[in-house]
Image (cartoon, rainbow, N blue to C red):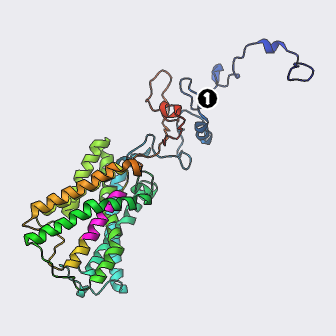
Amino acid sequence: MGPFPGGPPARSAADDEPYTGPPPTGPYAAPPYVPGALHGVHTPAWQQAVLRWQPAPGPGPPPGVGWEPPPGTPPHDEPAEYLQVMRMRDWRWWRPVLGLLLVAVVYAVAAVLVVLAGFLTGVFPDPTAIDPTDLTDPGLLLVTNVSLIVAIPCVWLAWAAAHGKRIGWSSSVLARLRWRLLAPYTLLTLPTLVAGLLLSVGLGLVAGDWSATGPTAGYGWLLLVVLLTTPLQSAAEEYVFRGYLSQALAAWVGRPRAGAVVAAVSTAALFSALHLPPDLWTFLDRFAFGLAASAVVWLTGGLEAAIVLHAVNNVVVFALAGGLGEGLATDAVPAGAGVLVVLVDLLAMAGYVALVARYRGRLRPETRTAALDLRAPSPPGVPGPPTAIGYGVNRRREAQHDPWGMG
């Protein structure tokens, strides 16, 4: 017995006619338009959701003003590296220019206001009691660190005002700081960076360029300032040099590898010069530090490894300088053992970069942004880009059932 009670329904003459599709809906009996279809490719359900959100159908964003993808849509059509994050759909060359101007102007004003407020409220010590030549003076270090920390919100402001995007794009390809990576990268500095710093200090003492005179006055206050403010000061410098400035330079270059090289060399040179090195060896030492920080940023897709490198270096240097006394300089490498100290520092930083690269498989840092291709499809008969299928991603990812391109 059939599925219908009493047998199948009676057939009509229309049932014997072949199906020719829905009635024409376009002008002059044109076939109906299927939004998002390209050369016969079916629009997946997740693309249809995007298309349904559009105010009007069409193969691309409608010509009206103000069209934006739905909230939460990735801002990149293709996965991008951290240094290419600025090249979003609304990329314009002038956005980083405006951002850098905002960072410079707002930081100059904010730093002055914060320092003045600190002195007026008594948070900072009496300016007359600060020795501007003693880098281990707790008061001088506190003022210096706080004046640098305010650069972090300045970078965030640039992302929000000049780019109109989330401030987290200054941190990593996930548009946030990946806290889970800080502890593992800190452990990787122990056999490399910390060991290299201890060996460098030993070489300086043996060569006679440095001397150990005992803890400086106020060493306890110095340690407190170092532990509370130096990690944030180090993060601020990374957000400026390996973060926004490197992203701007790489975005202007456009090509990922060339942009990474230009950004690394340029920011390392500027970073070293702004630290006012007294001699060539000190300049080269700081320059190599900048290159190492840029390398781990490129390897990990964010600032976490560079922040750890910078913070551990500064904490150990100031802790040793205050503990061993005024005979240990922190602003220059020892003259007698300059070549050896720079060589040891290079090996220590290279060792850290090598460990970060080796542990990428275990720590699995994300190195590309999520992406959704919203570029309009090519007209019929015109070959389109290999990654574009309507509003979708490439054929390979669609075939792998990864519609959001996050695999």
* Relative side of 42 to 321, left or right: right
Residue nearest the viewer, comparing 32 with 155: 155
Give the image location of residue 323, x and y in percent: 23, 78
Residue linked to disc 1: 34
Give the image location of residue 107, x and y in percent: 33, 67
Identity of the residue drawn at 32% across and 42% down? 256
Q: Is residue 311 magenta?
A: yes
Q: Does the magenta stretch include residue 145?
A: no
The count of marks equals: 1
Residue 151 is drawn in which quadrant? bottom left
Q: Is residue 177 visible?
A: no
Which secondary structure dominates the residues rendered in magenta? helix
> Where are the magenta residues, as a range?
304-316
Q: Quadrant of the N terminus?
A: top right
* Relative side of 257 to 286, left or right: right
Compared to residue 91, the image places residue 111 above or below, namely below
Identity of the residue drawn at 47% across and 46% down? 75
Give the image location of residue 120, x and y in percent: 35, 85
Q: What element carries label 1?
A: loop
